[in-house]
Image (tube, helix red, strand yellow):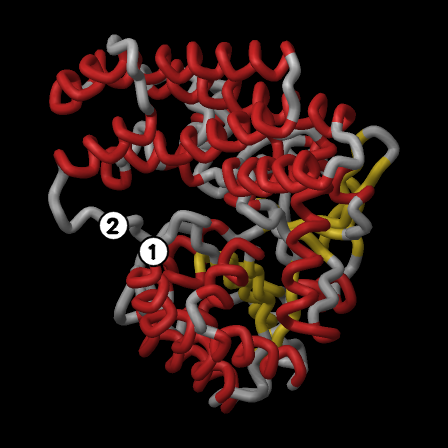
């Protein structure tokens, strides 16, 4: 019998700035629902990406039952882990060294949490953000496959097999997401029995934020139950892991994958606007703000590399550098750019500024670690960049104009106070919403 295979990947993540209240809410509405859905359907499999950022938050706030639940599913053979960057970094815009570091950090944290069942063979790129030069970093980190958005294939992918991509003498196996089916599921545009529409003898790879189940889309818990019920009772449909695609389906040759993300459109690609929600190329003020923010991050990264070479055996100095490095790891999370973007439904300038503040704290910590002219100049340059960002933002937002002006042009500029004032000026119900 020719079977149809559904290979779902659920990506779960929360930024390092997420609040305990929202973490608990999302865990109840989504993570626990995923665990129970699959525990009650033992024939169904899936692939899970959990960024170490979320793993640490779950541990910090006593939600170890979530970790244990996924661990048990992996022990039962229903679930495989995929690796990723620890703090949800946008890989194409980072140095190769940082990508590798973030992946290894992610593996170290998740290995401690999940034990021997954590044994990923592939990598999930946050936001499915890809550019060819990312390929060597993934290969050097020890991984053999990645998943990409369907748009990256330029219409050349098929669900009858898989391909390879190659760059600079490094190659990876790749499977492309069915963007149409994934989005139909994610936006609740399916009755839960979409598997009936899949082609026989093929596979359907979908990738979505796990938070879609129960948190973003309340009805999706019932929809998933219907789908898994259908798979359990039938012999011609099977739910598999992503790595099983490479085992069961044929290699179809090499393919050129385009720079893109799962939020990138074909029109964006034509315009060279490959990562519009994180590095806008056209629309102001996001274009200028994003460019400056990435310049700010790379300044902090380079200062960190420089400081690392200057660190000696002094315990206090090493402790301060370690704290700076940990702040930088967190400050690389991609959400900060996503929170100040062309899509107004999730725009929040405060959370964009919070990301900059984390990076700023890392840089100031380096200044405490070593007394060095280059670090001092980096701190001053970073301050100048942030002031340019604030100016760009206030020129586009009348509601924050007075507050920005008061702080930017005062001699006693204090970034943390600026953020606090902005928060107070907003609705008192302000929280860090869940992201994906």
Q: Is residue 223 above or below residue 416?
A: below
- Front residue of 413/304: it is 413
Disc 1 crowd, CA 10 A, few/some/many (<14, 14-19, 20+): some
Residue 122 on image: x %, y %? 71, 56
Q: Which residue is mark 1?
A: 19
**Marking on residue 431:** 2
**Visible residue check, residue 188:** no
| Residue at the (55%, 31%) spot, across then down | 365
Residue 335 on image: x %, y %? 42, 40
Disc 2 crowd, CA 10 A, few/some/many (<14, 14-19, 20+): few
**Marking on residue 140:** none
Q: Confirm or deny contact between disc 1 and disc 2 (CB under 8 A).
A: yes
| Residue at the (30%, 51%) spot, across then down | 433
Left/right placement of residue 53 relative to residue 347 reads right
Left/right placement of residue 316 relative to residue 204 reads right
**Visible residue check, residue 130:** yes
Q: Is residue 412 above or below residue 84?
A: above
- Front residue of 192/215: it is 215
Task: Give the CA separation, mark 1 to mark 2.
Answer: 7 Å
| Residue at the (50%, 75%) spot, across then down | 64
Left/right placement of residue 322 relative to residue 424 reads right
Upstream in sequence: badge 1 or badge 2: 1
Residue 30 on image: x %, y %? 37, 70
Local secondary structure at mark 2: loop
């Amino acid at each position: 019998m020719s079977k149809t295979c559904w290979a779902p990947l659920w990506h779960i993540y929360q930024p390092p700035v997420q609040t305990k209240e929202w973490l608990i809410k999302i865990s109840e509405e989504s993570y626990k629902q995923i665990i129970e859905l699959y525990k009650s359907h033992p024939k169904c499999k899936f692939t899970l990406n959990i960024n170490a950022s979320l793993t640490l938050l779950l541990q910090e706030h006593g939600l170890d039952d979530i970790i244990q639940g996924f661990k048990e599913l992996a022990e039962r053979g229903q679930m495989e882990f995929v690796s990723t960057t620890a703090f949800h970094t946008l890989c194409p815009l980072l140095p190769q060294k940082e990508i590798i570091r973030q992946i290894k950090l992610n593996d170290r944290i998740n290995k401690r949490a999940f034990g021997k069942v954590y044994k990923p063979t592939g990598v999930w790129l946050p936001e499915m953000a890809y550019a060819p030069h990312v390929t060597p970093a993934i290969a050097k980190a020890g991984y053999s496959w990645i998943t990409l958005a369907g748009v990256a294939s330029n219409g050349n992918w098929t669900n009858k097999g898989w391909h390879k991509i190659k760059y600079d003498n490094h190659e990876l196996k790749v499977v492309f997401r069915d963007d149409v089916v994934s989005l139909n599921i994610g936006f609740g545009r399916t009755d839960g029995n979409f598997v009936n529409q899949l082609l026989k003898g093929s596979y359907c790879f979908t990738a979505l934020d796990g938070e879609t189940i129960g948190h973003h889309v309340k009805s999706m818990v019932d929809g998933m139950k219907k789908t898994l019920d259908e798979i359990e009772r039938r012999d011609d449909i099977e739910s598999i892991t992503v790595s099983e695609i490479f085992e069961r389906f044929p290699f179809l040759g090499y393919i050129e994958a385009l720079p893109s993300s799962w939020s990138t459109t074909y029109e964006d690609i034509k315009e060279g606007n490959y990562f519009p929600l994180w590095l806008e190329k056209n629309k102001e003020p996001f274009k200028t703000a994003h460019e400056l923010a990435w310049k700010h991050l790379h300044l902090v990264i380079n200062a960190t590399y420089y400081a690392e070479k200057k660190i000696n055996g002094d315990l206090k100095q090493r402790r301060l550098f370690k704290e700076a490095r940990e702040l930088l790891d967190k400050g690389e999370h991609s959400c900060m750019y996503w929170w100040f973007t062309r899509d107004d439904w999730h725009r929040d300038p405060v959370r964009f500024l919070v990301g900059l503040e984390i990076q700023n704290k890392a840089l100031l910590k380096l200044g405490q670690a070593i007394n060095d002219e280059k670090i001092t100049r980096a701190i001053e340059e970073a301050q100048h960049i942030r002031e340019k960002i604030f100016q760009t933002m206030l020129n586009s937002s009348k509601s924050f104009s007075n507050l920005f002006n008061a702080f930017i042009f005062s001699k006693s500029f204090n970034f943390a106070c600026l953020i606090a004032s902005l928060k107070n000026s907003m609705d008192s119900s302000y929280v860090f919403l869940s992201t994906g």
